[in-house]
Amino acid sequence: MDKLRIDKWLWAARFYKTRSLATEEVNKGRVQVGGQDVKPAREVKAGDHITLRSGPVVRTIVVVGISQARGPAPVAQTLYSETPESLQARTAAAEQRRLAPEPAHSLDHGRPTKRQRRAINEWDQAGQGWGDRWSASVDD
């Protein structure tokens, strides 16, 4: 066997948990072979360059072997080799994410609790609310 459908190969190489997930990702254009978008039935062979995009991570791999059966992870890792540029880009992206965390994670306060909401409503009803301070009406 020297050729295999790309969705089967991605599943056997353990990039995706199910073959249907692999098919979806190929259909969404997140998998490219030789720099071109492909369909799930596209056959891959040893030596093909595949680009996978999973969120912010982009991996470029070279097909080394073909296997129809999904085996253990150490065996699956022998089916491909990642390019040095891809490894370097992934480590740089991981370092960047570590140094510049998501801004939303720094928020101290989320939604108000029931007690806080009641306090806000009491404040509004006491005449100190937003509507009493600001008015869009023409009345003075």
Image (cartoon, rainbow, N blue to C red):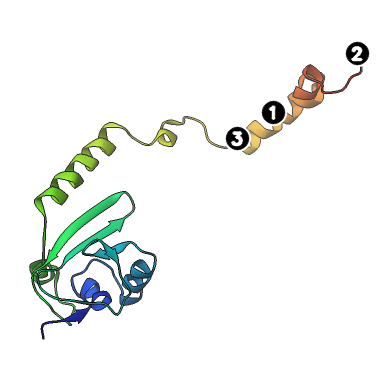
Q: Which mark is residue 38?
A: none
User: Would residue 128 be found to the left or right of residue 108 on screen?
Assistant: right
Say above or below: 82 vs 5: above
**Circle 1 residue:** 119
Q: Earlier in the sequence, mark 1 or mark 2?
A: 1
Q: Position of residue 96 (x, y in %)?
A: 25, 36
Circle 2 packing at 10 Å, graded few (<14), some (14-19), many (20+), is few
Q: Quadrant of residue 123?
A: top right
Query: In the image, which is nearer the foreground, mark 2 or mark 3?
Result: 2
Residue drawn at point x = 65 percent, y = 34 percent:
115
How far apart are the alpha carbons under marks 3 and 1?
A: 10 Å
Query: In the image, which is nearer the foreground, mark 3 or mark 1?
Result: 3
Residue drawn at point x = 53 percent, y = 36 percent:
110
Quarter of the figure that contains the N terminus: bottom left
Q: Position of residue 67 (x, y in %)?
A: 14, 79
Residue drawn at point x = 17 percent, y = 82 percent:
68
Q: Residue furthest right?
A: 139
What amino acid is labelled 1 in the image?
Ala
Q: Which mark is residue 140?
A: 2
What amino acid is labelled 2 in the image?
Asp
**Circle 3 residue:** 112
Residue drawn at point x = 78 percent, y = 17 percent:
133
Q: Earlier in the sequence, mark 3 or mark 1?
A: 3
How far apart are the alpha carbons under marks 2 and 3?
A: 34 Å
Q: Which element is circle 3 on?
A: loop
Query: In the image, which is nearer the foreground, mark 1 or mark 2?
Result: 2
